[in-house]
Every structure is written in structure tokens, then in C-alpha cells.
Amino acid sequence: MKKILILLGPPGVGKGTVGEKLSEILRIPLISTGDLLREHIKKKTELGLKAKEYMENGYLVPDDIVVSVLVERIREDDCKNGFILDGFPRNINQAEILENFINKENVKVIYLTADDEFLVNRLSNRRICENCGAIYHLINIPPKVNGICDKCGGKLVQREDDKEDVVRNRLKVYHSVTSPLLDYYRNRRKFFVVPGDGKLEETISNILKIEEDA
Ligand code: AMP
């Protein structure tokens, strides 16, 4: 059966890292709208140019732009057995649009939790590989060689929007616009709450248990 996992939770809670691991284990692709948008910015596409300023300041990119990027991706061949969503939907309107593209029976929503100060601390230590997008944390998941990606040797950089003032704005946006999705899905789909502030292995094993049981 086609598997669709939606990872919900505040910025920095680990949706990307958790999603990468789950993608390897479950063998379905991880789709991060943030990554797709960053790819457009890197390639300087028209869409990327429109999205850039919103992203660098921690605001949501307009729905029409994000939806077009997402729909293009989920139509690709590797999504036919399912996929994991990281960072989409981000508001109720996006959730409603998504309903048109997925079979509701296949969906599980995982809500990863952590408090704001933990997240500010985690994000300010986050580093991303410029080349392959792998995610590190200077304390919890450090690279073997400082500043260099273990996987591809690329340079590790800090995202513009991982700087503290932007992180605080992203959290504000999350609490006002994205968190209403929790009730939206709690009432409509298989919905699970998993702590995102523990060890990565524990988070993964909690989610895999949900996968097996539900
Ligand atoms: P992320 O990598 O998920 O933290 O996303 C980084 C930034 O990309 C966000 O702060 C938004 O500016 C933008 N973004 C990613 N996904 C969405 C979405 N579903 N809707 C609107 N903006 C998004």
C-alpha cells in the first residue's frame, strides 16, 4: 500500500534528519519543500527569485509557489509507493490542497514536539552541506572533520534563516499559522505525537513502532 507520512512540528524539531532516516529505512523518498525551494534559489529560477526574500526572513512563501513545486515533485516516478513530507503543509490552505493529491487512507501524521528555547539552541548549531544537503549538529551529530561533510566532502554552511533572530520569527510564524494544522489533522487522520527532543534513534524507533502497529 502507498505510504504517506506527514512530519509536522516546529522548525528545528528534526523533521529533516528524522525524515532522511525514515526514507532510508522505509525506502520512500523524503520531500522537503524547503529543500526544493532552496534548489530553485540556487539555480536562480524565476520561482526561486520569488521565494528567496520570504525564506531569508523566516516568512512563508506564497502557497501557489510552494504548491507548484510540491506537485511537480510528487508526480515523479519514485513517489509511486509513497513519500514522506517535511515542511508541507504549513497552513490549512495547503493541507486542503494536498487532499486533492493523496488517498486519505494512506496518510499518517507524525507530530514531533520540542519547546522553543530547545529549538533556538538546536538551530543555531545546525550546519548543512552546501553540496548534498546532509544535516549536521555541531554538538549532537558533528561531522568527522570540522566544516566538511562526511558523505560527500562538501563544505558545511549555516543557513541564513538559522540565525537567531530569523529562527525566532520562524517560530512565531509556526505558532500562529502552522500549529492550527495539529487540530486539523488530529480530527481527520491517524495522528501521533512523538517527542523530538530526545535521541535520534529513540525518535526513529518510536515512529517505526507506529508504522508497524497502525
Ligand atoms: P524548512 O527548510 O522546512 O525550514 O523551510 C525553510 C523556509 O522555506 C521556510 O521558512 C519558508 O520560508 C519556506 N517554506 C518551506 N516549506 C514551505 C511551505 N510549505 N509553505 C510556505 N513556505 C515554505
Image (cartoon, rainbow, N blue to C red):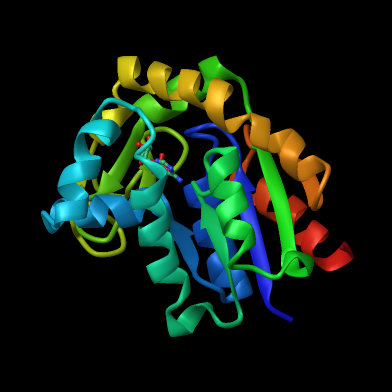
Q: In this view, does 29 lie above or below 86?
A: below
Residue at figure coordinates x 60%, y 40% from the top left: 92
Image spot of residue 13 (x, y percent): 55, 35
Q: In this view, does 120 lie above or below 9?
A: above
In the shown orientation, is residue 107 left or right of residue 70? right
Look at the image and tell me in which quarter the N terminus lies. bottom right
- Relative side of 204 to 214, left or right: left
Residue closest to the eye, 138 or 106: 106
For the point 78% across and 64% down, the residue is 211
Q: Position of residue 120 (x, y in %)?
A: 45, 20
User: Of 78 and 64, which appears nearest the observer?
Assistant: 64
Q: Look at the image and tell me whether residue 157 can be seen.
A: yes
Q: Which residue is drawn at 33% across and 57% down?
A: 36
Residue 12 placement (x, y as % from top left): 48, 34
Give residue 213's position: percent from left, percent from top. 88, 63
Q: If the image is split into quadrants, where does the C terminus sit? A: bottom right
